[in-house]
Image: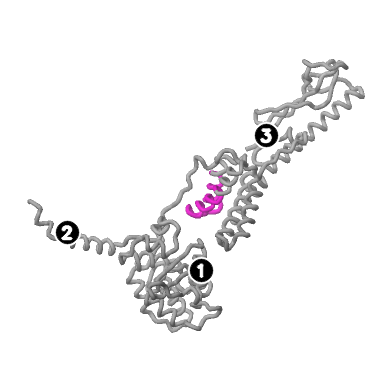
Amino acid sequence: MKSTFKILFYARKNYVNKDGEVCIMVRITVNGENTQFSSKLNVNPQMWDTKMNRAIGKSFQANQLNATLDEMKASLFNYYRDIERREFHVSAEKIRNAFLGITVKNQMLLVVFKKHNEDLLLRIGKGITKTAAVRYERTRKQLAIFMKQQYNIEDIALKEIKHNFITDFETYLLTVRDCAINTTAKYMRQLKHITTLAKNNGWLYADPFVNYKIRLEKVDRGYLTQEELNIIMQRKFSIKRLEQVKDIFVFACFTGLSYIDVKNLKEKNIRTSFDGELWVMKKRQKTNTESNILLLDIPKLIINKYKDKCSNNKVLPVSSNQRMNSYLKEIADLCGIEKNLTFHLARHTFATTVTLARGVPIETVSKMLGHTDIRTTQIYARITNSKISHDMHELAAKLQGMDKMLAL
């Protein structure tokens, strides 16, 4: 929205100095709000035109005074234009301070965001993953593009961020960038992290997110049923790359490891534990949390199949995520599975079909998946109809004979 800007010079006639002159004051008005200050110029009251707000006559003194006022007016107008271009909000006080050389230290959003991201890069591997650092930098870049397109500004002072800035950014992500609701929510969470950081440091007084709720949409992340998993397991592929991808995918279905954790899995991560059994023991790259998983017979067979066939002490020959997902789509077509088969689907299959559906408590599943919050596990895992049937049959067996107590 275009702001209104006015400059007025007036003589302060209620105070006359020893030379019989009065001070010329400057009043700046922006959007109805004004501020005033002394121009440091004096004039004889009889020489001042209160209607034209200029010195009267064509004398050298009058011409010099008016020329100085014109220069001052042009300078104030330039400060107004400069602030309008650089910042989100123009105020009379900002223009006055700029003209008088008063420096007000304002922390700027993108400057603080950049420093935050640089700190994250230094902490990679120490509680921070490279993926997290990249996501924050992506949000900073989106904010920069948004501010340029929406407000034609390069940055915004943190103290000027209001509720409408938050909602405008959300609208921009959903419409201009065509982001999904949950993707938008991730961007908004990272912006909120920065505003919280600013508030804690005293750079921001009011929380712009106070009346804003980050919205998440429930998504059916999909999983393979036992029948679909059986079809893939029983299929033998003559093409080596498809056979390898099938094996690695099945391995993930029975361990719950993500793509990056399977790719980085090394022989040192396979250890004999307290029970004499082989376990996968490693920290998840995404969260840096410990994930300990007992190796079942199927993943053991797959590990043995590729033993001593991988470089750098890797356990399995994992190619890029893009290639893996491309080959998995081929496998789905050849197996007659209509679902969108991706590597991450293996993790959901482990949570739902392999473990929860067979009675493994969700707390145990959450620990094996390396989740820091059990609510994350609840998103991954669904209670299938077969699980409900199994549980209810167990209940029916426990209640057997109680029907005889019913008086009909």
What kind of element bears circle 1? helix
Q: Position of residue 379 (x, y in %)?
A: 40, 58
Which numbered dot is residue 399? 2
Indicate which label's residue lies in the foreground, 3 or 1: 1
Residue 169: percent from the left, percent from the top? Answer: 56, 47
Mark nearer the N terminus (3 vs 1): 3
Q: CA distance from mark 3 to mark 1?
A: 51 Å
Which picture quadrant has residue 219? bottom left
Q: Which residue is mark 3?
A: 91
SS label for mark 2: loop
Q: State which quarter of the image contains the N terminus.
A: top right
Residue 373's tag is none
Q: To which residue does mark 1 refer? A: 260
Magenta stretch secondary structure, dominant: helix
Point out the stretch of residues depicted in magenta: 167-192
Earlier along the polypeptide chain: callout 1 or callout 2? 1
